Amino acid sequence: MNDYLNLLIGLAMGLNLLALGTSRLPVLIRAVGAQGVLLGLVPLVLEAHELDWRLVLITLATVAGKGFLIPGLLHRAMRTANIARELEPYIAYIPSLLLGAGATIAAVALARHLPLLPEHAGTLHVPGAIALILTGFILLIGRTKAISQVCGYLILENGIYLAGLLLIRSTPILVEFGILLDVTVGIFVIGIIVDRIQRAFDSLDTRKLTALHE
Amino acid sequence: MNSMLLILIPLAGAALAAIWPDRRTRPLLLPAVGAAHFALCLWLMAAPAAVDPAAWLAFDALARAILPGVSLLFLVCACYAASYLRLKEQGNRVFVAALLLVLGLLSAGHQARHLGILWIATEAVTLACVPLIHFTGTPRAFEATWKYLLVGGTGIALSLLGSICLGYASLHGGGSGDITFTALLAHGPSLSKAWVLTAWVLLLVGYGTKMGLAPMHTWKPDTYGESPGLVGALLAGGVTSVAFTAILRVKSVIDAAGEGAMAGRSLLALGLFSTLTAALFLLRTRDFKRMLAYSSIEHMGILCIAASFGSAGVWAALFHVWSNGLTKGTLFLSAGNLQRAAGSASMDDARGMSRILPHNSRLFVAGMFAITACPPFGPFFSELLIVRTGLTAGHPWAIGLFLVCLLLAFFGLSHVVFAIVDGRPRLKKPDPALLRETAGLVLPPLALLAASLWLGLFTPAILKDAWSAAVLQLFPLP
């Protein structure tokens, strides 16, 4: 079981580096979507010995939401805004990659020292969650296009979702669905605002959002 | 069941508003639902039912201590909204539905006794506020909405991570990982300390962002400055109070885990830093709605300072939630009226408003004195109580700094308020429709000011009783 778990999370961590290193928005969005699919499958691997309908339902909803619905919305926003590249990030691509690699190493090192239950120690579960959260922050801070920042936010959310799976046995399904619904609606709302910003400012460069200050 | 009605009535109202065909009569749904909600709140407050400890949502002592105040604020804002929307040409379907949605979700957040439900309600309120914030439709409003979503979204994500850490603290300490507050309190001493501390930091930063504590406050001036006045009133008096409730509930778990002293210190430090930051920014802001946002940051800081002073401090904090919420309502509603007439919220353009809108200007000045803790309004009494509990709890230095901040805030607020009220009007092309002071736009802020005065002079026994019961719930006697 741990081999499959490590494989899924390891691939998701690899996608972090792809997301940090690319300047092309379609690649970034696809990386985030693929990460969503991989993480959506994690509950099946974690609970492989006692599969039931609620687990399958959560898996399907997560894969559909994180893997297809949200990336689809972002693709549409990108096409209407008619941009495909992030040209002038605050943190350039190579430094972002180095930061991301550093964050991944730090996450693995940190997880060794955390007080974990025996079943969670020794896998990539906790280091993966920390690495995803840190990568999300690097993208949120380091990019200037609204869509890239949303992708950073999604990777951050993915990391928190992975951390939430530590509690999979004790979280009621209603709560899981509520959280998933909130996240999806949240991205939908962000997508609408991105569209309005594009119309109001004729740009998705968040550096132009400087009218409000002291 | 009645507690569920507090959530379901507004949600049903929101659904009705979404399908209501007529634009002109739709806003009347707001006062109707608001009145029903407030009546139910009063009834539940007067006759509190026993709470099932395992329930996820219940009108428990803490909800009883705060939610009626939020409901009153909403009712008054709803009456104002009915007159406000009559002035607007644009469609109001989304605006009315979102306002009612906010009321329902606020009721859910205040009554949540499960960390996951609490998070879901808070995040949903955050999202439901989005159409309210960009209602004016200007590019500046969309810029403010973007910052609100990004900063608020990141904050709220961190509070989800904190909730997960608290669940893991239970799991690691041999518990079941159940994150209802009842279960967490019962497991208190056995919770894993390292995870409890991590959870506290994340939850404080997360819900602190929602409250608007410095240094996570950056979204607040932009959002309050660009959204309509009544939305500012609801954000400052309603949405922030859900986040404060969340912090109070979480802190009681941290206390039970034996880390209360550390949590108290961090609340005190964050509260003082927020109050100081807000006071310094108040000295240099030139925009009277951004000024109200900084004042809100200041008062959120005051709530945290009070909450760090133990049970007596929490009692004073609950009092201050009421007095701040009602007084801020007066200020936001009258500021909205002044901004509409002046066509600007900057003191460089808005001058001599006392000659253009005399009633609103009087309300704005009176509200300013009320919020800067001049007697005999509510904030004076609640802040006096906070000062006294702070001195009793042995924090003379913190209280000294707190009083200096209050003085600085008074300088900043009075400077801006008198600059726009006094002087010669500068309107270039006054629009007569916007210069009329109709009863529907003046009476609501007046009612809130009267409520603040009444709260200060004759604090009703039923409220004192509700606050004491909430303190008893948060600090169970050993």
Image (spheres, coloured by chain):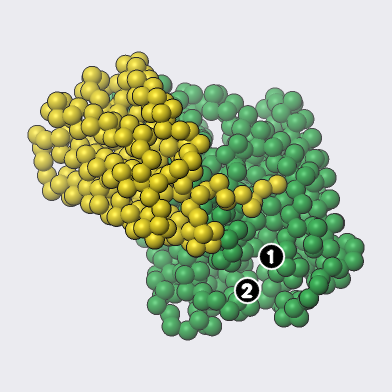
Chain colours: A yellow, B green
Look at the numbered disc 2 and give the secondary structure of its residue.
Answer: helix
- Residue B288 figure quarter: bottom right
Q: Where is residue A17 in the image (x, y as percent from the top left)?
A: 33, 31
On the rendered structure, is A160 left or right of B82?
left
Badge 1 is on which residue?
A: B336
Q: Position of residue B252 (x, y in %)?
A: 48, 34
Q: Which of A38 and B403 is in front in this view?
A: A38
Q: Residue at x 70, y 31 (%)?
A: B390
Q: Where is residue B283 in the image (x, y as percent from the top left)?
A: 78, 43
Badge 2 is on which residue?
A: B84
Q: Nearer the viewer, residue A100 or B176?
A: A100
Q: Residue at x 76, y 81 (%)?
A: B432
With respect to residue B246, does B396 lie above or below? above
Label 2: how many Cα within 10 Å (few below 14, some 14–19, many 20+): some
Q: Which chain carries label 2?
A: B
Look at the numbered disc 1 and give the secondary structure of its residue.
Answer: helix
Q: Do the residues labelled 2 and 1 touch (CB within 8 Å)?
A: yes
With respect to residue B355, does B109 lie above or below? above
Q: Which of B139 and B182 is in front in this view?
A: B139
Q: Nearer the viewer, residue B253 or B247?
A: B247
Can residue B411 be seen by looking at this rendering? Answer: yes
Tell me the kind of residue under disc 2.
Tyr
With respect to residue B373, does B68 lie above or below? below
